[in-house]
Image (cartoon, rainbow, N blue to C red):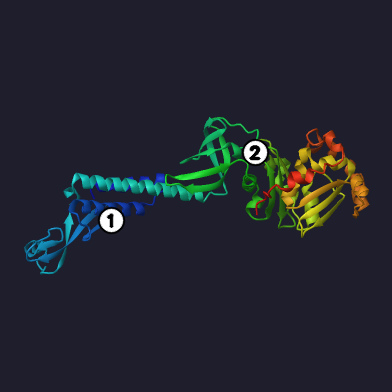
Amino acid sequence: MNNKEINLIEALNVLEKEKDISKESLFEAIESNLIVAYKNNFNKADNVSVNIDRETGEFHIYSQKTVVDEVKDPVTEISLEEARKMKGSYELGDVVNVEIESKDFSRIATQSAKNGILQKIREEERKSLFEKYNEKKNDIVTGIVQRISGRNISINLGKVDTVLVEKEQAPGEYFRPTERIKLYITDVVDNGKGPRITVSRTHPGLVKRLFEQEVAEIQDGTVEIKSIAREAGSRTKMAVLSHDEDVDAVGACVGMNGARVNEVVDELRNEKIDIVNWSDNPAILIENALSPSKVVAVLADPDNKEALVVVPDFQLSLAIGKEGQNARLAAKLTGFKIDIKSESQAKQEGIQYVFNEEDYYDGEYYDDEYYDDEYYDDEYYDDEYDAEYDAEYDAEYDDEEDSSEE
């Protein structure tokens, strides 16, 4: 094995490692392009074969020629005399494999073969990149901010670049060049020049994947994320279910002293996250989804996906949330159109409902936590919501698409 053959194997090993290109596909590309070079040189390739040793890199080009008395086409025929110089037993009509030296090719033929091999390498690299990132579709990748052009941000993902467009950025998020950020891949398209990757910081899937990375119980299937509703940059509601009665789904996602949920919150730049228990009972699920507000009664219609919710008078503002956000996210999370009324409104409209008075009036509502925690500060408690519930509220969120992930 000479130095050229050693260099060939080393070069193919480097290409396979650095560009994720199969070495076998490169061998095939070299073989096919040597045949093309032969054809360009001799105007015929039907009778040629190329063999490359995969271990040593040694290659041979053979032209199959028929033994004849008189040679009329030297590309496909060989005289009996010449054939017997190679092997004395050859007879007329036999087919002889005559080795062709690549140095006999013209410069044009050689250049054509080289270009063909380089083209194959580029194609295989594009194919490899597409397959690599297509496997990451609906998953998280880490990128490095390259430059900011207006509101669009150029991101390097390692071997390819992408652009985080303005509509896929959460309101209030700002990035600096060289900063590392996590992105959710929503689509990968092969445009002939390499993969075009669409990334997002607003997709609910980003929240889901972040929790899957942080929570071991989600990774092993003990806890399942059933639904997510998100208004990026502001608040997310997530419903979780435990498949083990000894494991608290919400507690697993929150973590010791909030360690797990705080990791996600930090990555989302302090976006608030409500984690509630999932239930197959629509009424219970809706009640949980409206957290932190307490609920007096839920009248759910599963067939029409509608629900009437009654809350204490002084918690109507909390149930609706600032600009209707709490109720809107609860509707997205559950898939129900939710109409929220205070107890006074329900009585005025003659709405009949049943509730356990002991459950709702044992002082639980008047616990300080509902006045002092983050949910009952100025952000959620606004005097404008002390007025009658706005009849236009339903229309505000009814048409919102359900952003939960199956």
Residue type (three-letter) at the residue carrying disc 2? Leu
User: Can residue 222 be seen by looking at this rendering?
Assistant: yes
**Left or right: where 21 falls relative to 42:** right
Position of the C terminus, as image quadrant, is: bottom right
**Left or right: where 55 falls relative to 318:** left
Residue 149: image location, x then y, percent: 53, 30
Residue 146: image location, x then y, percent: 51, 33
Q: Which residue is mark 1?
A: 53
Query: Helix, strand or loop at disc 1?
Result: loop
In terms of depth relative to the viewer, which is nearer, 93 or 270?
Answer: 93
> Measured along the vertical axis of the image, is residue 153 above or below residue 116?
above
Residue 391: image location, x then y, percent: 82, 44
**Left or right: where 375 falls relative to 8:** right
For disc 2, the neighbor class at 10 Å (few under 14, some 14 to 19, many from 20) is: many
Numbered badge on residue 188: none
Residue type (three-letter) at the residue carrying disc 1? Asp
Query: Helix, strand or loop at disc 2?
Result: loop
- Specify the quadrant of the image occupied by residue 87: bottom left
- Specify the quadrant of the image occupied by residue 111: top left
Residue 316: image location, x then y, percent: 85, 42
Q: Which residue is mark 2?
A: 268
For disc 1, the neighbor class at 10 Å (few under 14, some 14 to 19, many from 20) is: few
Q: Residue at x 55, y 40 (%)?
A: 142
Task: Tell me how far mark 1 sits from mark 2, CA to CA.
Answer: 53 Å
